[in-house]
Amino acid sequence: QVQLVESGGGLVQAGGSLRLSCAASGRTFSTYAMGWFRQAPGKERAFVAAISWSGGSTYYADSVKGRFTISRDNAKNTVYLQMNSLKSEDTAVYYCAADYELMTIVVRTTPGYWGQGTQVTVSS
């Protein structure tokens, strides 16, 4: 089992950058694929990015490709989401997620573990 705690959200102007962090508990962090999802007001939760347990494979939603970068540090039990060139439509609650299977995150979008979320607001 793993517990996830996000941080790094906040208010930023359009065109700016933020880096989200997700700290995971447990000694088996390096065996989990990790991902980020987001939920905007009035919309369903949507996949943003995912990374394999080794960091060797990454996946992104089309809407964030070229602007967002997911990475992980297994020694620190932490996954990151670097967000650049932010737009007002990136405003959402961002959730960290974990699962043993990468495709459960990317394709099925039903990971086994979720964080509580962190708010990102982009002002135009």
Image (cartoon, helix red, strand yellow):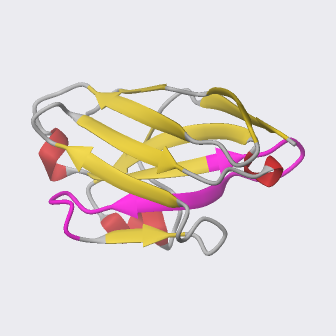
Which quadrant does the C terminus fall into?
top right
Instruction: Give the vertical position of 21 relative to 85 (above or below).
Output: above
So how many labels did they put on this image? 0
Q: In this view, does 30 lie to the left or right of 97?
A: left
**Residue for point 73% across, 41% down:** 92
Residue 37 percent across, percent down from the top left: 57, 50
Location of residue 2 (image quadrant): top left
Q: In this view, does 118 lie to the left or right of 39?
A: left
Q: Give coordinates of residue 36: x percent, y percent.
A: 49, 50
Which residue is nearer to you in this view: 8 or 110?
8
Quarter of the image where the N terminus is located: top left
Q: Give the residue drawn at x 79%, y 45%.
A: 40
Viewer-closest of 60 and 105 = 60
Magenta span of residues: 38-56
At horizontal 42% and vertical 71% (from top left) the residue drawn is: 59
x, y percent for residue 58: 34, 68
* In this view, 65 is above or below 51: below
Q: Which residue is drawn at 20% across and 33% down?
A: 77
As for residue 51 lying within the magenta part, the answer is yes
Nearest to the observer: residue 61 or residue 99? 61
Task: Please check the rendered image and state whether residue 20 is part of the magenta-colored stretch, yes or no.
Answer: no
From the top left corner, tell me how far across and down residue 49 is, in percent: 48, 60
Q: Quadrant of residue 53?
A: bottom left
